[in-house]
């Protein structure tokens, strides 16, 4: 049965078996997995995962879809559906009543694209406040342009604050492309499946709040050189000296610095 998609919830039903199989394969499901799915929609992905996992917690904002999902999968012992906004729900609090579904270790989802950034931040946390219970892996279907930014490397036009912030917390990989024609209704943009694997860096930054600040300021005006964007926190001369000591060009822009460069720069500037 075709379910009409609602625009306000970013609904685009995935219709490609190839894409669904790619998502499932990337998640490397095993019998012990406890999955969180954000925005199950009509349940195309849910249906494929349920037989292979220990527990599946789904969070769906659309009441009509929730009714449908309960009718379809409500009987399954390993399925729990929460109706609400993933970004707003206090999930640990709610799961106090459903302890079997807490401690999910993987996220697998085809998410609404308009809230991709906030969803990733809720899953990973931030540089200064990382998720204390890191997930094993996060497999998401997202807009291609955002996926490209997650994996972007320095000296690339699309390498930005998002790239540095997420790469600090996780390894990101683009698994495959999913063209717009694989969805109903067809979105305006192409999509990719990404795998985000949270990890700890060997050498973490000394002052994570400070690193967040210089990333934000550094990328605030992309055309400007770092020494201009960071003027409010460090003198030009001093910054030039630190950049030189780090083997970086004194005319560098934010997009020229690798993740390691950002960490070293933060540690140096913070000492001043
Ligand atoms: N997984 C389905 C649907 C993807 S569309 C498929 O692949 O076909 C995105 C889904 O996220 C929709 O079902 C939409 O209702 C739901 N959604 C949108 N905003 C949400 C939010 N804030 N919290 C939870 N679900 C949301």
Image (cartoon, grey):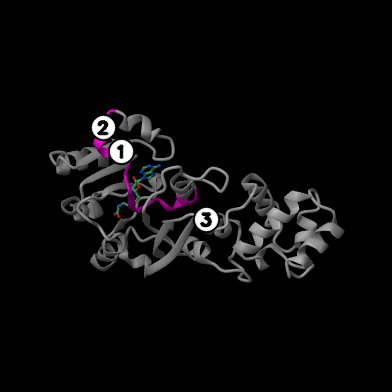
- The secondary element bearing badge 1 is classed as loop
Residue at the (43%, 53%) spot, across then down: 113
Q: Which residue is mark 3?
A: 166
Q: Which residue is mark 1?
A: 102
- What is the x, y in percent for residue 198? 44, 54
The magenta span reads 97-117
Q: What's the CA distance linking mark 1 and mark 2? A: 7 Å
Helix, strand or loop status at disc 3: helix
Dot 3 and dot 2 residues touching (CB under 8 Å): no
- Residue holding disc 2: 98
Q: Quarter-wise, where is residue 262 in the image?
A: bottom right
Residues marked 3 and 1 touching at CB (< 8 Å): no
Q: Label 2: state its secondary structure.
A: loop
Circle 3 Cα neighbour tier, 10 Å, few/some/many (<14 / 14–19 / ≥20): many
Residue at 27% over, 64% down: 25
Q: Is residue 159 above or below residue 117?
A: below
101 within the magenta span: yes
């Amino acid at each position: 049965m075709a379910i009409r998609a609602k625009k306000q919830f970013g609904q685009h039903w995935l219709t490609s078996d190839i894409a669904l199989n790619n998502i499932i394969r990337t998640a490397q499901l095993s019998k012990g997995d406890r999955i969180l799915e954000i925005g199950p929609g009509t349940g195309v992905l849910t249906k494929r995962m349920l037989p292979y996992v220990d527990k599946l917690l789904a969070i769906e904002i659309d009441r009509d879809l929730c009714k449908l999902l309960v009718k379809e999968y409500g009987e399954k012992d390993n399925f729990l559906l929460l109706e609400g906004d993933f970004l707003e729900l206090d999930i640990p609090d709610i799961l106090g009543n459903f302890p079997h579904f807490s401690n999910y270790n993987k996220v697998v989802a085809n998410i609404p694209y308009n809230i991709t950034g906030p969803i990733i931040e809720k899953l990973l946390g931030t540089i200064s406040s990382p998720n204390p219970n890191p997930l094993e892996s996060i497999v998401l279907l997202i807009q291609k342009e955002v996926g490209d930014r997650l994996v972007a490397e320095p000296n690339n036009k699309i390498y930005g604050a998002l790239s540095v912030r997420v790469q600090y917390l996780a390894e990101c990989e683009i698994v495959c492309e999913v063209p717009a024609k694989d969805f109903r209704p067809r979105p305006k943009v192409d999509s990719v499946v990404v795998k985000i694997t949270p990890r700890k860096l060997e050498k973490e930054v000394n002052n994570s709040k400070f690193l967040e600040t210089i990333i934000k300021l550094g990328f605030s005006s992309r055309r400007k050189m770092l020494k201009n964007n960071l003027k409010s926190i460090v003198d030009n001369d001093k910054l030039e000296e630190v950049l030189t000591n780090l083997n970086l060009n004194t005319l560098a822009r934010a997009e020229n610095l690798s993740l390691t460069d950002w960490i070293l720069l933060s540690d140096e500037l913070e000492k001043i």
